[in-house]
Amino acid sequence: MIKELHLKNWKSFTEGQLYIDPITILIGANASGKSNILDALLFLQKIADGKQISAAIDGDADNKGIRGGHEWAITHGFTEADLTVVIQSDIDEDIDYRYNIIIGLMGEGKIEVKSESLTRIAASTKGGKKTEKKMFTTSGNDLNLPGISAYFYTSTQGRGKRIDLRRTYSVLSQSRSLPLLKEVQQSIDETAQQLSRIFVLDPIPSHMRGFAKFSDRLQPDASNLAGVLASLNNGSKQQTENILTEYLKKLPEIEIINVWAEPVGLLKSDAMLYCKENWFNREVLTVDARGMSDGTLRFLAIMTAMLTLPPKSLLVIEEIDSGFHPSRAKLLVQFLKEVGKSSNIDVLCTTHNPAFLDALGNEMIVFISAVYRHKETGASRIKLLEDLAQLPKLMARGTMGKLTASGILEEVLSN
């Protein structure tokens, strides 16, 4: 699973490092740079899936790219951006992979690969120094050429096996079908698979109220939520809907009896989301997605993502509590902890909500990172709260929610 993300000259960050845990919370004021971290992860997911570099940034017919496009992908005043991720092997927990890609403007407003590498890091069995082995690296001497020369590890002396690839796509995605050493191929496959399991969720309730085609993968806007639930096999469908119902029943403002999705129409190729509600012991009402609140639909989208994504995925959610009443904060945190653990899903989210931060409790402070702007340079910075020297004194003044709402934490960080 992904353990670390390093950013250099990426959007508003001249330098930044984020540690990723089972639950990672990003806090910070508007325009602090939180969204730019999410954009970096989205970019890495797209290029690992085989998207063209320029399409991953500027978008194409199939995707909308990242915010700002190529004009804002690289920090102003610089010509290249540098992203690095550290990933733990799914097969051997003593092995990590460090993947680095440097992209730059290569003319005509197009961003292409300038450099790329993948390093296998193995822990010593005797607890000594870790050993590093380059699985592939690229030449920095051919920047004026349309292709890029990649050198792959061969277990013999020398630079490695040279293969010329396209600069418009990541070397990582192009390497998956090449005849390479088994160790190299496994390293490439594991890294690409893990990056492909990044899922950036931005639920839009207005998109979730209509009929949805059957689907085995949730869309980023959760517009096909009903189709995903309805397409599950009988055992998984019942189990998933039972879990959704279990948590929705805990919502304070209404008594929900159950929630489900089922096929509709003559051809039964579309689905609709339904729930049964008991209003103050009166008659039971069946409500479809058109009558559900925005908050309920967003809650369902987050829960469905965590219950249906492949194990070892990283679920990324911006403003996770948007549209939720503060009274739901504890329930949302409870769900993230319990289902994240049982489904083996990591969650990275941003929040401005004091109630959500207070619901996390002091034991979760170690998983909170603050994003802020440097007072003099204006560049975005990332700070683990547990590394903040003033934290004990700050906590004596109030809860984390109160500290963020009052602006005290932001003031301390910027100074």
Image (spheres, grey):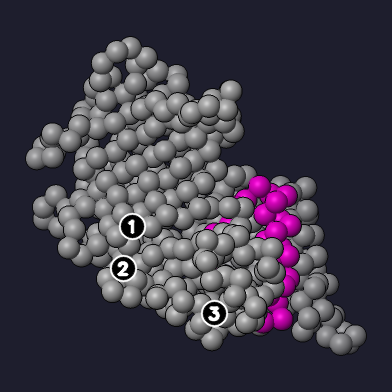
Residue numbers of the magenta segment:
326-350
Report the residue at 25% width, 20% height from top: 159
Q: Is residue 93 above or below residue 294?
A: above
Q: Is residue 220 left or right of residue 60?
A: right
* Residue marked by disc 2: 379
Report the residue at 11% width, 37% height from top: 145
In the rendered structure, find residue 404 and report the number of the disc placed on it.
3
Figure quadrant of residue 241: bottom right
Looking at the image, do the residues carrying marks 2 and 1 touch, with CB atoms under 8 Å apart? yes
CA separation, marks 2 and 1? 8 Å
Compare marks 2 and 1 and give the one earlier in the sequence.
1
* Residue marked by disc 1: 15
Compare marks 2 and 3 and give the one earlier in the sequence.
2
Position in image of residue 290 (x %, y %): 62, 78
Q: Is residue 267 left or right of residue 68?
A: right
| Quadrant for the N terminus in the image | top right
Q: Is residue 198 above or below residue 410?
A: above
The image shows a total of numbered marks equal to 3
CA separation, marks 3 and 1? 23 Å
Q: Is residue 331 visible?
A: yes
Local SS, label 1 = loop
